[in-house]
Image: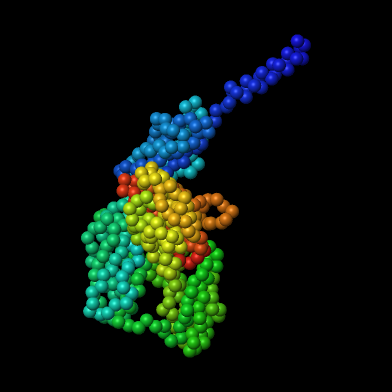
Amino acid sequence: MSRLLRFAAVAVALVILSGTGCKKNSAPEPPYVQGPSKAGPGDTLTFRFTSEDPEGDNVRYKISWGDGTTDDWSPTSPSDEEYDQTHSYAVANTYYVKAKAKDTKDAESDWSEDSVKVTVGSFAPKAPSRPSGPAKCTTGVTYTFRTEAVHPLGDSVSIRFFWGNAVGNWGPMVGSGDVYAESRRFDTSGVKMIAAQAKDASGLESDWSDSLTVVVDTVHVNPSGAPTNLKLVADSDSTVKLTWSAPVDSTPGWYLVSFREVGTASYDSIASCTLALSYVHTPAYRTGHYQVTSVFTSTRSTSIETPSTIPVWSGVLQVPELSGTGRTGFGWLRSNGTATLYDMTTADSAAKVDFYVTDFAQGFAGPKYYAASPDTAPLDPGGTVPGGNWNMTMFSHLDSLAGEDSILPRWTASITRYRRAKSLDSLPRLVAGYTADGHYALLRVTNVDTTLGKVTLETWFQLIPNLRLIEH
């Protein structure tokens, strides 16, 4: 054989060998870290770590807790499966948890790109929900009002009401998120602004809730000369357009537009000296109530209408998994934002359901549950949902540092962040929703029970289409 032919044969052999036996090992992906954002000193906290190895090798984790301590390499876990580890912080401070992964061939990832921020300290309860109860009352009759308050650490709370002219007594301790009810008899007529406040066992008090307007023995009419027919629409997904009608019995010199942010007690002027019958407000991601005042030469007249951008809270509900017992379809009424559960075994519910909970398998043993779009339900192996014109809702996880009042991710058809189903893991889990008719909503899932087939959650629904503002 010639020298040239022998050289060519050796070259071919080397190419074959290099393609079959010398594949380079790649490091795992930087871990995805999940965990609580708030805690008390000494609380035992659970964090979850996930990393995917390109070759599917098992991985180990090294964890930096942000307090000067670092856990050495953990036992091996399967690629792309969650690894749980607990930790506690004795001193109140802010800590950042990060991790890196290593495969069985000792190839290490970089440190995780997004650290979990944990704030350790004392936390007051959140402001209770706006009290629910009758909007019209009669003097001398006893009525019941209800509210709920959530504590950031899940501690029990005591609640008291402001009855429009007097602050009531603190009630007994109730669980975080549990309904507290109190009865009241009004002895004088007039308009009452009913609000609630919470405190925990250490005496830390929340802000006052948004107020419920209650009219006692009076006729609710607009003052003479006040603007009427106040309405809100979305001018963009973060700006609001307010419109109104001029008074029918007089002509104002100009109008004053005011805004009261949720959780505050007074209105602030956002526009004055306007002659138009509309105003576009950029609320800097705040929500609240609006009012318009007619200004005359020597008098002012303010409409009683105070339209709001505050999302409607569902209360804490238990939603059965698709194979579970009870009504499994969750929907929001577009008239008032009320949350209702519907029977998904009938096609009559197709136009009413906005999402359901599923493990995409027969039974409800999980291990993972998802919030899913109703239009996927007829093909879901876990249920017997008939065909029909079921709604489509898209979902997106909020970032690990986001809170309940964070602005929701923007939905656009060209961005794939929103999907027809999102997992309900790393509890509590915050999930953004976007309905087919353009309503944004927030889901907060606090418990997934695969034994009973139920999910505990609460939602906030924005009644104004195409508006992302979710502060509550």
Would residue 326 be found to the left or right of residue 241 on screen?
left
Residue closer to the observer: 16 or 42:
16
The image quarter in which residue 65 lies: top left
Q: Give the residue drawn at x 51%, y 29%.
A: 107
Q: Give the residue drawn at x 46%, y 43%.
A: 115
> Residue 336, percent across and down?
41, 68
> Where 224 sits versus 332, above or below?
below
> Residue 422, percent across and down?
46, 49
Would residue 249 be found to the left or right of residue 452 on screen?
right
Name the quadrant of the N terminus.
top right
Q: Give the residue drawn at x 53%, y 57%.
A: 410
Residue closer to the observer: 358 or 458:
358
> Where 200 sits versus 3, above or below?
below
| Residue furthest out toward the top | 1
Residue 344 is at least partly visible in this image? yes
Q: Give the residue drawn at x 43%, y 60%.
A: 347
> Residue 428, percent across and down?
38, 50
> Residue 378, percent across and down?
46, 53
